[in-house]
Amino acid sequence: MGALFHPQSPQAEAISTLFQYVLLLAAIIFLVVSALVVYSILRYRARPGATEPRRTFGSRKAEITWTAIPLLIVSALFILTVRTMAFVDAPRQPTQAPDLNITGHQWWWEARYPNGAVTVHEIHIPVGRRLLAEIQSADVIHDFWVPQLARKMDAVPGRSAYIWLEADTPGTYQGTCSEFCGMQHAWMRFQIIAESEPQFSAWVEHQAAPPPPPGAGLPAEGARIYQQKCQDCHTRNGPSLDHIASRKILGGDLPNTPDNLARWSATPQSIKPGNHMPDQPLSPQDLRAVVAYLGSLP
Ligand code: CUA
């Protein structure tokens, strides 16, 4: 709710303005109707010696008035809404290629950029530039929503939808899935990180580059275990872990610390029950090695 009053993009601003117009109109109607009801209750209440009030039948003037006023109000709302939609909505069949592709999975969000960069939970955008984002789903219906930046958009399996994604000021904006999509729907969180154009370019290039080879010792041992036990799933349908050490959050809402990385690697089911990654029976030594390896993927 608070986000509606603190929009941070031209599109969110337009939605917020429309919301405030509707709220104002609804408040005026509420006050007028309440005042009339209270007036009638007091004016025509039963009193000793009071007669029945006069009844009016078939008043053309009254009929026209109470048809015309609501018609005017609804027309004004209609025009305001259509104008806002024209400004806020991306074309349904855009002629330009999308600037990024966002895919909903149970229960994480993935973003792919044209240069090959792939990220999870944290979507970076350059500040002040309007991006065309393609929204898709890998499994069930999700709904992509960053209240301060853009309208909601359903992610429907087998279809592409498009939104404008833009931020006026640098910062981190909270996003959430807003269509019930199963057990961990509530924790299908993500962040949009808006940064300056040079910072964004550096980030997107870094994310597209292959991670460096693991260092000798524990990270190399971890890489070996990772290839045996994790890699297959994480390249086929699980989230990409390249550059996982550069991310601030894990699993949608967990700070990316070595402790949390170890907890998530070994017992993801106790953190996000029902998620598609099974608990991993790793020895403490193997777990340390895997965490050392993942922690070395900047
Ligand atoms: Cu995805 Cu709710």
Image (spheres, rainbow, N blue to C red):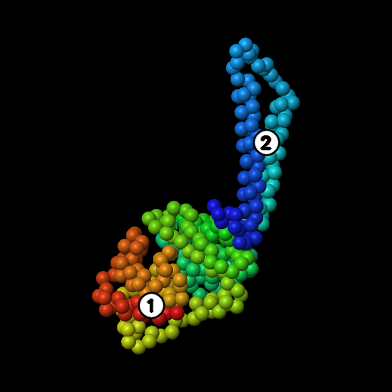
Ligand 1 image-quadrant field: bottom left
Circle 1: element type: helix
Give the left or right position of residue 70, taking residue 284 as reference: right
Tell me, for residue 165, which label it has, or none. Answer: none
88 left or right of 259 in image: right
Residue with the mark numbered 2: 70
> Residue at the location (50% across, 77% down)?
207
Q: In the rendered image of this protein, does residue 24 appear above or below residue 294?
A: above
Give me the residue at 62% from left, 62% from top.
Answer: 9
Q: Which residue in the rendered view is the most extreme toward the right?
A: 61
Q: In the picture shown, does residue 35 fall above or below 175?
A: above
Assess disc 1: are there few (<14), some (14-19) or many (≥20) residues with their C-alpha within 10 Å of its C-alpha: many
Name the quadrant of the C terminus.
bottom left
Residue depicted at x 50% and y 65%: 191
Q: Which amino acid, mark 2?
A: Pro
Residue toward you, 237 or 283 = 283
Task: Give how far apart the Cα atoms at labels 1 and 2 are.
Answer: 62 Å
Q: Earlier in the sequence, mark 1 or mark 2?
A: 2
Q: Residue furthest front?
A: 48
Residue type, numbered disc 1: Leu
Q: Secondary structure at mark 2?
A: helix
Residue 51: quarter of image: top right
The residue that disc 1 covers is 294
- What is the x, y in percent for residue 265? 33, 71
- In the image, 96 versus 290, the foreground residue is 290
Q: Position of residue 280 (x, y in %)?
A: 29, 70
Q: Is residue 190 above or below residue 57?
A: below
Which residue corresponds to the image point at 30% horizontal and 76% vertical from the top-left?
287
- Quadrant of the rendered image containing residue 139: bottom left
> Residue 281's image quarter?
bottom left
